[in-house]
Amino acid sequence: MTTNEMWGGRFARGPAAIMEAINASIDFDRRLYAQDIAASKVHARMLANRGIISQADADAIARGLDAIKTEIDQGKFTFSRALEDIHMNVEARLKELIGDAAGRLHTARSRNDQVATDFRLWVRDSIDAMEAGLAAFQRALVKKAGAHAATVMPGFTHLQTAQPITFGHHLLAYVEMAARDRARFQAARRTTNENPLGSAALAGTSFPLDREATSRELGFASAMRNSLDGVSSRDFALEYLSACAIMATHLSRLAEEVVLWSSPAFGFVRLSDAFSTGSSIMPQKRNPDAAELVRAKCARVTGALVTLLGVMKGLPLAYAKDMQEDKEAVFDATDSAALALAAMTGMVEDMQPNEIAMRRAAGEAFSTATDMADWLVRVLKKPFREAHHITGRIVAMAEARKCGLADLSLGELQSVEPGITADIQSVLSLDASVASRTSFGGTAPDRVREQVRYWQEQLK
Ligand code: ARG
């Protein structure tokens, strides 16, 4: 076996097959090719501007890199595991295309600052894509919420019917979560958008680099101030993965609700054929597979975060090869999270609530008992604890009679609390109940419409 043409000068033989298998990252880090080439062009131009390499060499390097970009774009590039990673695959091809000038590209640079730079650029692009996806998700939710600001459904705690709410209100809860998810991605972007290029292997370099220029040209906010930190920090990726994991957790909760809601036992929403699958044995089945897979993808994204935390926690400064494993975690989490986000957006747009089934369920299980207790407090001036107790006895009576609270006669109600008047009926209907919850952030249709307008404005 021949020695590595990039670093094999002091080696007598090439790596064992198993060494190549564990060492090579080209099968996954080829996804960094556009970032790698863009950063190399900026580096070469800066080297020429500083007189470190000739302008002619820099021009040849730029032309060669453009040609390689086209080859990879068009699927015509042959990737080689023997060349380990994307950086050496590109440089080896550059040598084939432009000859010895290719060897000047790596002046004042190491793969350590190169990969950190490429990866930050890649994560930055993913953050921007995730943010755009979240905005589309929010728009879909707000649109549905606007159409269902007054559609009554049961609100649950402990998955037990608690109080009537509106479907629009429920959907807007996810808009709020998505807004915080976006803020987390924006924060991760600030951490990510710093330039490690010029850190070289770990100590910086003796060449007179212009790190301001490379930062500016690559769109970084600034050059990283410490070369050891530049090559060895991956907290930007951890922050990005945390944002992905928290977002995926939110998507998974909504997915779980879609699974419940679309079950015939609930019958709250219907997913169209576009988002349902059939069973190979039970002809009647409509399964919410996409929602179920969103739940599972969430586990993968969380797993990626835990993986990278585990990789990083024991590493002394500066670079160690362990860090090569950052990429598969980030790539898999990105693919899973982006797919989950798009699928959830599609399901929100697609799902049709069954207003009759939701209203029927909302009316079950004495869901307006709190309204009754509140009436006792407001009209009879009872302390809330006593009102709670009185209402509890009335609920027990209705349960024994197998009827709803509104079905009890005034005489029956007065047998528990003589002060009750017929006026109490006015608070026991579902519509009266939701309409009364006018506190800021509450479920009253007017409040929901107000929030829909707020988000329409924000998302313009
Ligand atoms: N493929 C490597 C990675 O992803 C590039 C950096 C390699 N540096 C080194 N000194 N071996 O981390």
Image: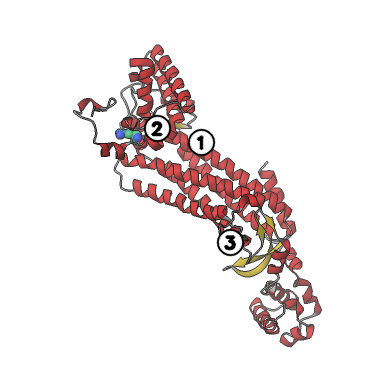
Total numbered labels placed on residues in the image = 3
Name the spot of residue 356 as percent of width and height, x first. Answer: 73, 64
Image quadrant in which the N terminus is located: top left
Residue 378 appears left or right of 51: right
What residue is disc 2 on?
196
Whole-number angstrom distance, CA of label 2 to CA of label 1:
17 Å
Which of the two residues, 266 or 456, is positioned nearer the viewer here?
266
Residue 280 image-quadrant placement? bottom right
Q: Nearer the viewer, mark 3 or mark 2?
A: 3
The picture quadrant for ligand 1 comes to top left
Q: Of the residues shown, which amino acid type is indicated by label 2?
A: Pro
Q: Which residue is mark 3?
A: 282
| Residue sitting at x 58%, y 48% | 343
Whether tag 1 and tag 3 are in contact, CB under 8 A, the answer is: no
**Within 8 Å: ligand 1 and the Cβ of disc 2?**
no
Give the secondary structure at mark 3: loop
State the residue at coordinates (76%, 66%). 431
The quarter of the picture where the C terminus appears is top right
Secondary structure beneath label 1: helix
Spot the residue most to the top. Answer: 56
Look at label 3 and name its amino acid: Met
User: Could you tell which of marks 2 and 1 lies nearer the N-terminus?
Assistant: 1
Asked if residue 151 lies left or right of residue 310, the reply is right
Q: In 3D space, how far apart are the residues under numbered discs 1 and 3 (Cα atoms)?
A: 44 Å
Considering only order in the chain, which callout, 3 or 1, is on the residue closer to the N terminus? 1
- The Cα–Cα distance between marks 3 and 2, rounded to whole angstroms, is 57 Å
Q: Which label was assigned to residue 125? A: 1
Within-10-Å neighbours for mark 1: few <14, some 14–19, many 20+: some
